[in-house]
Amino acid sequence: MLTSCLSVTHLFQRGVETYPVELANGEMYVNRDTIKGRDLMFATILELLSEVPVTTIIDYLGVFIGVVAGTIYAIDRKMDTFGAASLGMVTGFGGGVVRDVLLQDQGMFFTQHPMVVLMGIIISMALSKGRKHLSYFYDKLFYLDAFCMAWYVLAGASKCWYAGSGAVISIILGSVTAVGGGACRDICTGEIPRIFLPGKFYGISSLVGAVFYVVPMSLGVPNNVSSVLCVGSGFLLTVLSEHFNWQSHGESAKTELL
């Protein structure tokens, strides 16, 4: 649960007054007699979020980022609205579906949250309709894809960790979740998945990000700190590999088909 992962006290300040909202033992305590207006609304939202598992919130954000990245990827390749929406959904849900199939006993996020699927379709179609205003983001697609990958490392590793799968499986499935959506997207566009090609770090970055989540969690580091380390390390390594031209290497010539 979010409350079990964030053992902190939130303070809302208004002038010299301070309004404590405590997250402890799975419950939220709000002094509603002293909180008014926006502070009360914000506290109510936090109360609602306290009932949602942190892994689910991470998945929500991951789907949104993936749908946006996949849709812009499709628009950049001149796909129509249906094609862009389809590729956005494949990118947004692909990695999570692969993770949930391998995890087996935690249910399928894709089928358990139909409203997220609907929102993903709406977002993707809206982006496709407004494609003329997205030209600025085409050159930034690499960074969006890198952040999407890093966030999905967190989505995969955190769900496996809290499911009790252990450190090794959490690292592996964190990496699989991160590259799964992009691999499905590449297959749908007739390209060899980036994960299988030599070049700039991608799969390596996902493994590093997963390690930077699981190891701190194993040492008792708070979840929010481990999450920042995970996303930050995965994203930063991918960007640095692009900037400094760090590459993994493979055979220079293709093997001839028999």
Image: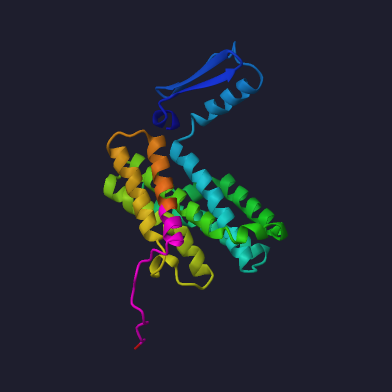
**In this picture, residue 146 sits left or right of residue 135:** left
Residue 158 locus on image (x, y percent): 38, 43
Residue at the spot x=46%, y=54% of the render? 149
Residue 50 colored in magenta in the image = no
Residue 211 locus on image (x, y percent): 32, 48
Magenta extent: 237-257
Residue sitting nearer the eye, 125 or 211: 211
From what the image shows, is residue 71 above or below residue 109? below
Q: Which quarter of the rendered picture does the C terminus lie within?
A: bottom left
Is the stretch drawn in magenta largely helix, strand or loop?
A: loop
Taking the view exactly as shown, the residue that stands out farthest to the bottom is: 258
Residue 101 seen anywhere in this rendered image of the structure: no
Q: Which quarter of the rendered picture does the N terminus lie within?
A: top left
Residue 241 locus on image (x, y percent): 41, 60
**In this picture, residue 33 sits left or right of residue 167:** right
Total numbered badges shown on the rendered structure: 0
Residue at the spot x=38%, y=70% of the render? 198
**In this picture, residue 15 sits left or right of residue 149:** right
The answer to which quarter of the image holds residue 141 is bottom right
Residue sitting nearer the eye, 76 or 31: 76
Residue 57 locus on image (x, y percent): 49, 39
